[in-house]
Image (cartoon, grey):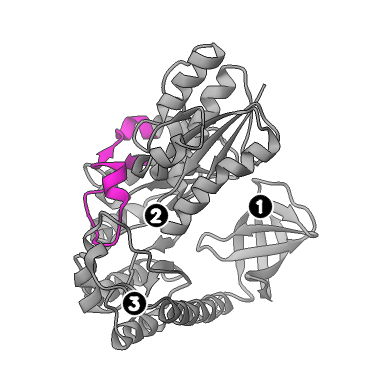
Amino acid sequence: MKAVLFTLGCKVNEVESASIMSALEDMGWEVGDKLEYAEAYVLNTCAVTREAEKKSRQLIARVRKFNPDAKIFVCGCASEKNPQSFEEKGVTFVCGARKKQLVVEEFCRIFGGKAAGFYYPKQVKSRAFIKIQDGCNNFCSYCIIPYLRGREASRTVEDIVEEVKGVQSPEIVLNGINISSYEGGLPRLICALHGVDKRVRLGSLECSAVTDEFLQALKGLKDFAPQFHLSLQSGSDRVLKAMNRHYTRAQYLEKCRAIYRAFHDAAITTDIIAGFATETDGDFAESLSIIKEAGFARVHAFAYSPREGTAAFRLKDIPPDIKSQRLHKLLQAGKEAADKFARKFLGSEQVIIAEEYSDGATCGYTGNYIRVYVKGELCSGRKYRVKLLSLYKDGVLAQINGQE
């Protein structure tokens, strides 16, 4: 029997889906993560935007086209926020974001079998995502996730290290809903990973995480990937205050400078919201200008989506056409910033980990998150030394200099 686990949303969702995959495999199921015919589907949903919720609900009809008689299990943030919208579609089982282990228990009840409890995620990619914590206490005014995921809770250092020891992937990514709040501090966890012979990458960070102690701990890793996804959301102090972000533009830029002092080749990537409620033309201009000032290597920009239940929902929204225009400008500025960052490294030798092969080329990423294409098919998961030649597609074209 086959089960498909299809995931929308964040990397934490992907990790949690992969844990369910491990449990089902242990019970004898064949599992996959692409939509195709199966006897059972697990749909791990997202609610970060209205569009994500809509896509989550539309998944029901999509999977029924493959098998109208399949059992459908729904979990995640969208079903935490509005379980009835899924229940009324006649699915087999619905739970939310906080108790996804109930999916496995329901599989056992319906199909028989027994699960052993917590399972480390099934590794389906060349990098392994290690979930170190869950939940968020920040309550940014635009964000529904703290209400759906609940309060912060961290795994123990010992448990995380034990999972890392069993990982076969050459790269691990420490992730969670808010890893900056890891209990006991990120430096303590990072120091516990100093002996790990793998590339270590970090998930999204808040300004508060960037301290001298944190940066020094990273320097002690054998193979640290110097990419810092430092969440911004707006370059305007007025908007940041309205978002309940707890830092100013100047403080954010000082954190960027501290990172560059510690890691000269570092990539700083970020998120910026276009058209937050009450955002003025002047506020938006500050978001646009900070892209160059911070020297971002990549910008993830998206339009503001009011979420009922958040503090910002009561604020006056701005017209959709203005949001769209601002989003277009952010995306264009982000593309220019990414090209400028990549150009700095043309002609240099970098180490990539080969990932996917398609259209005659293999892609992978440098430590500082430049997407690299090499003609031909390379061995997935292997490290290669490459020379960066020229801008290409959404990254850089390179030639192989040798294997690590």
Residue 379: % across, % down: 72, 47
Query: Residue 318, which numbered label?
Result: 3
The amino acid type of the residue labelled 2 equals Val
Residue 124 is drawn in which quadrant?
A: top right
**What's the residue at 62%, 28% (across, down)?**
70
Query: Residue 378, which numbered label?
Result: none
* Residue carrying label 2: 48
Left or right: 343 in relation to 323: right
**What's the residue at 43%, 81% (across, down)?**
326
**Dot 3 lies on which element?**
loop
Q: Is residue 153 magenta?
A: yes
The amino acid type of the residue labelled 3 equals Ile
Q: CA distance from mark 3 to mark 1?
A: 43 Å
Taking the image as drawn, is residue 116 in sight? yes
Tell me if mark 1 has few (under 14), some (14-19) or many (20+) residues whose alpha carbon lies within 10 angstroms of its own: many
In the image, residue 67 sits, relative to residue 345, either above or below, namely above
Residue 72 is drawn in which quadrant?
A: top right
**Dot 1 lies on which element?**
strand
* Residue carrying label 1: 354
Q: CA distance from mark 1 to mark 2?
A: 31 Å
**What's the residue at 56%, 15% (across, down)?**
111
Q: How many marks?
A: 3
Q: Mark 3 or mark 1, which has the lower sequence index? A: 3
In the image, residue 47 sits, relative to residue 324, either above or below, namely above
Q: Mark 1 or mark 2, which has the lower sequence index? A: 2
Depth check, mark 2 against mark 3: the one in front is 3
Depth check, mark 1 against mark 2: the one in front is 2
Q: Is residue 134 magenta?
A: yes
Verify CB contact (< 8 Å) between mark 2 and mark 3: no
**What's the residue at 32%, 58% (across, down)?**
307
